[in-house]
Amino acid sequence: METIEFKLAELFCGPGGLALGAKSAVVSAKDKKYIVKPVWANDIDKDACRTYSRNIHPDNAEAVVCAPIEEIDFEKVTGFDALAFGFPCNDFSIVGEQKGFKGKYGPLYTYGIKAINAHNPKWFIAENVSGLQTADNGLAFQRILEDLEKSGKGYELTAHLFKFEDYGIPQFRHRIVIVGIRKDLNLKFKVPSPNAAKYISAKSALEDPPIGRDAPNNEMTKQSAVVVERLKYIPPGGNAWHEGIPENLRLKVKNARLSQIYKRLHPERPAYTITGSGGGGTHVYHWDENRALTNRERARLQTFPDDFIFEGSKESVRKQIGMAVPPLGVKTIIEAVLKTLAGIPFNSVPAKILNGNALVQRKLPFNSQ
C-alpha cells in the first residue's frame, strides 16, 4: 500500500495536543494510506517545548525550536506541506480585555501567514477561542480570514465553531477552527458531523479506567481548611455563589459572580472548560471529594493519554494543559481533512460561526453512566 505523508509544521505548538491528534489520524482509500508526520514545531515556552519534544519528537530534539516566533526565518526551517497554528488567544478571549490587534498577542497570527507564504503548504489548520468572532466588533476575524485566503498561492477556507463535546470530548469546549486547502487542489473542506451519540461525562472520563496512583503529573493540590469547608456546602455543578454556603465561608468579593470560582464538576455532564491560568478557586473541583483536580485529571478531560508526560512545575503543567487543543478533537478534524484530500465522502454539517448574537445549538443527551 502506498503511503501519502503530509509533513506538518506547527507554530505556537504548546505541549503537543494538536500534533498528537494529527499523528493519530490515519485514512485509507483503496491502495493508499494518508497520514500526517510532525516534522517541525516552535513555541516560546520552555516547559511546553520540553513536553512537545518528549512526547512528539523523542528522538529529534532539534525538531522543536524554542524561541520567539519573531526570530524564526521561515525560509530556513524544515520543509513542510501542512501547517498548524493555534495562535495565542489572550487578546481575543471573552474572559480577557479583548484588545484584538491592539494587544500584544493579537497580531501574532501574521506569522502563520509568513510561514504559508514561504512554503505554500497544501493545507493548514488554525485554531482560536470563540471570542475571536467578536473581537474588534468582528473586524479582527474578518481581517484574519481575508489574510489567510490571500496567503501563499491562495486558499479555500472553511471556518467553524467546533463544540468539542459533540465529538466525544468530556468537556464543554468551543473553539474556532479554520481549515484552508490550497486553491489549485480544487477542494473544499467540509465540517465532519458530530460523532458522539451521548455526551461523555466527567465521571466517566476520570474513572473509566481509574487513574493509577503513581500516574505522572498526578500530584494533589493542598487545600486550605477554609476551602475544604466551603466545598462541603457546594453541590455538584455548583460554585462559590451557592446560596447554601454559610455566611462565614462566603467570598467577600464585590460585583463578582464568575461561574467557575470554586465550581464543582457535575459527574453526569462534561466538564466545564479547562483553563490554563487563574488564581484561587479556578482549578476545577471534584464533584464529590473536597479538592481541586490533579493535572492528570485535567489532562484526561482534555483527552491526553495517561502516558503523555508534561514537563515543568505543577503550575506550568496546569497552564500547558489548559492552553492545549484536545487531541481527540483534532484527530476527528484531521481525518476529515485527509478524507477530503483522498476523495473519500463522509457525513458533514454546514459550517457555522456567529450569526449576529445567535449560535446554533446542537443538544445531545447526557451520558447517564
Image (tube, rainbow, N blue to C red):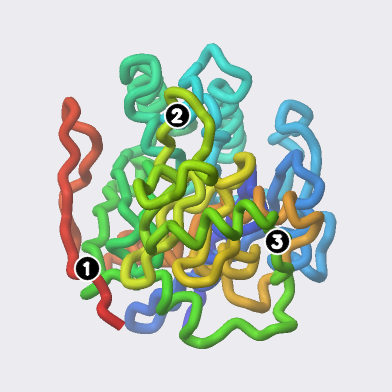
Residue 11 in sight from this viewpoint: no
Q: Is residue 341 above or below residue 145?
A: below
Image quarter of residue 171: bottom left
Label at residue 221: 3
Q: Secondary structure at mark 2?
A: loop
The mark nearer the N terminus, 3 or 2, is 3
As helix, strand or loop, the secondary structure at mark 3 comes to: loop
Numbered disc in front, either 2 or 1: 2
Left or right of 215, for residue 265: left
Report x, y in % for residue 133: 33, 29
Q: Give the residue number, with chain letter if any, for mark 1.
A: 346
Q: Nearer the viewer, residue 329 or 153?
A: 329
Q: Residue at x 40, y 75 (%)?
A: 27
Amino acid type at circle 3 is: Thr
Q: Residue at x 16, y 55 (%)?
A: 362
Amino acid at circle 1: Phe
* Tag 1 secondary structure: loop
- Is residue 9 at least partly visible in the picture? yes
Give the residue type at disc 2: Ala
**Residue 256 has which mark?**
2
* Nearer-the-camera pick, 101 or 281: 281
**Vertical comparison of 3 with 193: above or below:** below
- Residue 104, position as x, y percentages in the image: 62, 19
Q: Quadrant of the C terminus?
A: bottom left
What number is the disc on residue 299?
A: none
